[in-house]
Amino acid sequence: MKQIVIISGKGGTGKTVIAGAFAALARDKVMADCDVDAADLHLLLGSTIKKTYVFKSGFTAFTHRDRCEGCGVCRTACRFEAVRENFSIDPISCEGCAFCSFICPRQAIEMKANISGKWFISETRFGPLVHARLGIAEENSGKLVALVRQKAEEIAAEKNCRWIIIDGSPGIGCPVIASITGTDCAVIVIEPTLSGLHDARRVIDVAGHFNVPVRVIINKYDLNCDMTEKIEHWFKDKNIKILGKVGFSKAVVRSVVEGKTIIEYSENKVTRTLRSIWRLIEEEL
Amino acid sequence: MVISVASGKGGTGKTTVAVNLALSLDNVQLLDCDVEEPNSHIFIKPVFKSKSKVFIPIPVVDKTKCDGCGRCQEVCIYNAVAIAGKKVLIFPELCHGCGSCTYFCPHDAIKEENEEIGVVEAGEKSSIQFIHGKLNIGKMMAPPVIRAVKKHINKKKTVIIDAPPGTSCPVITAIKGTDFVILVTEPTPFGLNDLMLAVEVVRKLKIPFGVIVNRSDLGNKKTDDYCAREHISILMKIPFSKKIAGIYSRGDSIVEAMPEYREKFRELFEKIKQNKDESSAK
């Protein structure tokens, strides 16, 4: 079983469109949407939720006013500015560390378990999809990502699947690290902009830091051919393989609007490139 | 006034809006709080004048004082401290730096050492004071770096915050305490799905907000319908243009290449002031 994760550093470069195309092209696969903040892959794959689970993680402090004497020890101890002037707790700032509840001389602060989100196993036109929805303004997205990946691995093992296709999130922090560790290849989707290159370089360093092999797709390459050329040179110097260059096409936007992968939607230069990219991945991994 | 620019989905145009708004106004501070992937500096090209490191405290055990009593393990909710036999093991990547273990150690055997997780750089470009943060490679926690950037807020200026994408802790840290949030979206099912999540976030934080629809002619009408249904004001629409895409790709700003946009961004600012006053009057 091989795990491929699609990331980009910068948002909006086309991760989900490309993950959707891979889902349509790969045989024997399970999909995992690890962008638990803002999951979108299910919108492309036509998913029906089969099972819903609650994700519990972490705690939030709660002050019992009847027991509180207002000594203020909690407020001094808290490093997250989560204890208000009246010693009630601002749940959004609270990190759930419980320092306040340990230090309170009156045991007036209770730590309550958070319901931090939900995760789902869905059936799609292309096979099983594990995805999640982090609760609004919740944290621990890294843990939820790990959970989504673990379930996808279980399903893949059970069904003897060849591929796990992971749609990642933008950035380089905790959810991205949780999405890429232990995968067989990180496919970096980069757009030909200064920001795109700047951000891709950072996320490639993160992948290197965690020993994840990297390959690159330049998406919407024809929006700035000079920049594309610069990017190609940069990667060549770094010995990083470019799998292919995908052109800009309004058909991609239309396919998203129709809730289809670009592979299903039409046959054009974009799909031809994506097919050859997928063939390369199949050959190399 | 402090205005933050956010979005659920990445790549919708947060930085474009933040940068061009900053370039259209006087007496501005621009804070790039997307510390995982900061980009605003590419467009502003500031001269950086100062650089400071951001640290988080990590517990370190003095073995000569520790008798392995295990109190530190009891008070660490993140399992960042574990007792193996009589030895204390610290897992810095799980530590949130709350200080509980240090405080409760009965033998005064734990002290905190600073671990660098990022940097904050400050500089200037014409009338803009520019500050951004950068999370170090391989580090998990963006919020402390974001908080360090926000320490520079000068309320005597118009402050514009370029926030990270998503709906979880980094975004919350960036937009919390700001006076108005601009949510930038695109009119596709992805954009709309993620906009709806972002709206839930700003409503939970009770911050007045409005929407900018970028690449407004690529997609469908459902974003307009949603905003009408939810009584959300659409502050501005920016149509897709290969010219704008080209300007962006080279790291240039729209208002410098297409000066007619300067007036549009000033109008945007006026609308925001109006919107904010109306919501605080409610």
Image: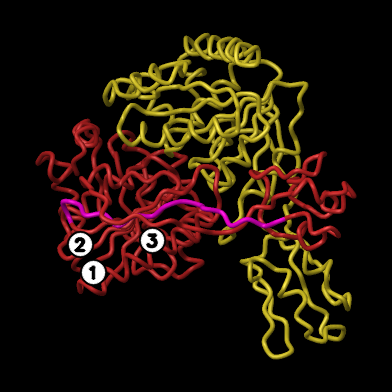
Chain colours: A red, B yellow
- Quarter of the image for the N terminus of chain A: give it: bottom left
The reply to whether callout 3 and callout 2 are in contact (CB within 8 Å) is no
Write the start and end of the magenta stretch as one range. A110-126
Write down the residue under mark 1. A284
Residue farthest toward the front in the current orientation of the protein: A66
Q: Earlier in the sequence, mark 3 or mark 2?
A: 3
Q: Earlier in the sequence, mark 3 or mark 1?
A: 3
- Residue A7 seen by the camera: no
**Majority SS type along the magenta span:** strand
SS at badge 2? helix
Disc 3 designates what residue?
Answer: A148
The three-letter code of the residue at mark 1 reads Glu
> Which residue matches tag 2?
A280
Which of the two marks, 3 or 2, is nearer to us in this view?
3
- The image shows residue B53 at horizontal and vertical percentages of 73, 52
* A12 vs A19: above or below: above
Q: Secondary structure at mark 3?
A: helix
